[in-house]
């Protein structure tokens, strides 16, 4: 990472705002509620905002852009993603988006890892955001489409955009640690956005999972890690775990639920709520520079900011390590 992007990384702060919720993930919210949620993040001191064309078929970008357009541009960092371009889809305009966002499917996503596709994606995002430039461009979910195309085409295209000054920093955003590691080795990336793979319940390489060594390699290369999905889709989001808790978007298996309850009990012994420990856990590794969380209402993001600022005693981490529940 060059000096300028080292400064950008420092500007991210510890907590970022993720734009899935204001893109109507799972349920629709009003424009007013979305704007209030982004404003609540700003009021909480958050200055890093992440979005993507994928989130609500552009809705998240439009909503976040409308709020940030009223803020001093030099005061915030904005990231969006490339790889999926949005194209009109008249045949599906009367149905809901099949990818989990409560919006009309007037557009459809197309994978385009070419240099022209990456540039087109950036141009479309700038128009929806209403901003003059994008700080960070991540290649979004290359493992869902084609890692070969990602390495041969999309990542070089991003490096070219950065060299031209059209974006300040580049990276990859993925749910797969192995894919992230492959991208880190293939290109000079400033950041990795890793979703759900470095949490109190799951780390790269643990239990045979792919991507062992990812975070250490990122530290060696000076590539910052933005950790998202720290609650593993809900199981770590509440102090007391319900029996129907979700883990990675499905019903939590019994062994995972039992482990999470052990984590919650030990946290409670130390006077800490489980979600407070979960949101701060990623900073246990020095490669992690930011934790970004989503919200669909002002109270959610305010609560996350409060949890991030709550002191977690070192004795808790030590206790969890000694009991074999988190890595040293």
Image (tube, rainbow, N blue to C red):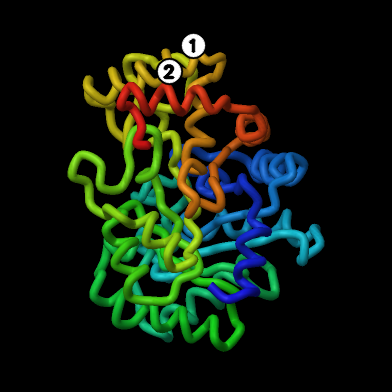
Q: Position of residue 203 (x, y in %)?
A: 33, 42
Answer whether residue 90 is visible to the viewer in this image.
no
What residue is at 54 percent from the left and 57 percent from the top?
51
Question: 10 Å neighbourhood of mark 2: few (<14), some, or many (≥20)?
Answer: many
In this picture, residue 25 sits left or right of residue 135:
left
**Mark toward the start of the polypeptide (2 vs 1):** 2
**Residue situated in front as seen by the camera: 106 or 128:** 128
* Cβ atoms under marks 2 and 1 closer than 8 Å: no
Gap between marks 2 and 1, in whole Å?
9 Å
Quadrant in which the C terminus appears:
top left
- Closest to the camera, between mark 2 and mark 1, is 1
Which type of secondary structure does the marked residue at label 2 adopt?
A: helix
Give the numbered dot on residue 269.
1
Image position of 319 (left or right of 132): left
Q: Residue at x 56, y 14 (%)?
A: 271
Q: Residue at x 36, y 82 (%)?
A: 114
Q: Quarter of the image holding residue 326?
A: top left
Tell me: 16 left or right of 111. Answer: right
Kindly identify the residue that appears in the image at 62 percent across and 59 percent down.
62
Label annotation for residue 193: none
**Nearer the observer, 68 or 201:** 201
Mark 1 burial class by Cα count in 10 Å: few <14, some 14-19, many 20+ = few
Count of numbered circles in the view: 2
Give the percent coordinates (x, y) of residue 102.
46, 44
Q: Judging from the image, what secondary structure is the residue with disc 1 in?
A: helix
Residue 292 percent location from the top left of the image:
54, 46
Q: What residue sits right under mark 2 in the picture?
A: 264
Residue 150 position by quadrant: bottom left
Q: Position of residue 305 (x, y in %)?
A: 65, 35
Give above or below for 324 relative to 60: above
């Amino acid at each position: 990472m060059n000096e300028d992007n080292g400064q950008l990384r420092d500007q991210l702060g510890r907590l970022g705002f993720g734009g899935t919720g204001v893109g109507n993930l799972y349920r629709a919210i009003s424009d007013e509620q979305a704007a209030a949620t982004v404003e609540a993040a700003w009021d909480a001191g958050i200055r890093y905002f992440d979005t993507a064309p994928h989130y609500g078929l552009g809705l998240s970008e439009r909503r976040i852009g409308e709020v940030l357009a009223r803020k001093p541009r030099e005061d915030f960092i904005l990231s969006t993603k490339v790889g999926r371009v949005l194209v009109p889809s008249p045949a599906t305009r009367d149905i809901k988006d099949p990818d989990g966002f409560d919006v009309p499917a007037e557009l459809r996503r197309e994978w385009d890892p070419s240099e022209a596709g990456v540039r087109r994606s950036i141009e479309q995002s700038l128009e929806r955001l209403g901003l003059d430039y994008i700080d960070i461009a991540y290649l979004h979910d290359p493992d869902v489409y084609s890692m070969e195309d990602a390495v041969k085409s999309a990542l070089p295209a991003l490096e070219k955009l950065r060299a031209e000054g059209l974006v300040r920093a580049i990276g990859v955003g993925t749910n797969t640690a192995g894919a992230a590691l492959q991208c880190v080795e293939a290109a000079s990336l400033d950041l990795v956005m890793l979703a759900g793979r470095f949490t109190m319940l799951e780390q790269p390489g643990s239990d045979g999972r792919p991507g062992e060594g990812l975070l250490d390699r990122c530290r060696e290369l000076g590539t910052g890690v933005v950790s998202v999905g720290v609650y593993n889709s809900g199981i770590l989001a509440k102090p007391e775990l319900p029996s129907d808790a979700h883990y990675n978007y499905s019903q939590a298996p019994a062994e995972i639920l039992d482990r999470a309850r052990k984590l919650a009990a030990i946290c409670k012994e130390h006077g800490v709520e489980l979600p407070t420990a979960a949101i701060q856990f990623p900073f246990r590794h020095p490669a992690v520079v930011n934790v970004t969380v989503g919200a669909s209402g002002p109270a959610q993001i305010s609560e996350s900011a409060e949890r991030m600022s709550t002191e977690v005693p070192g004795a808790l981490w030590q206790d969890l390590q000694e009991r074999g529940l988190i890595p040293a």
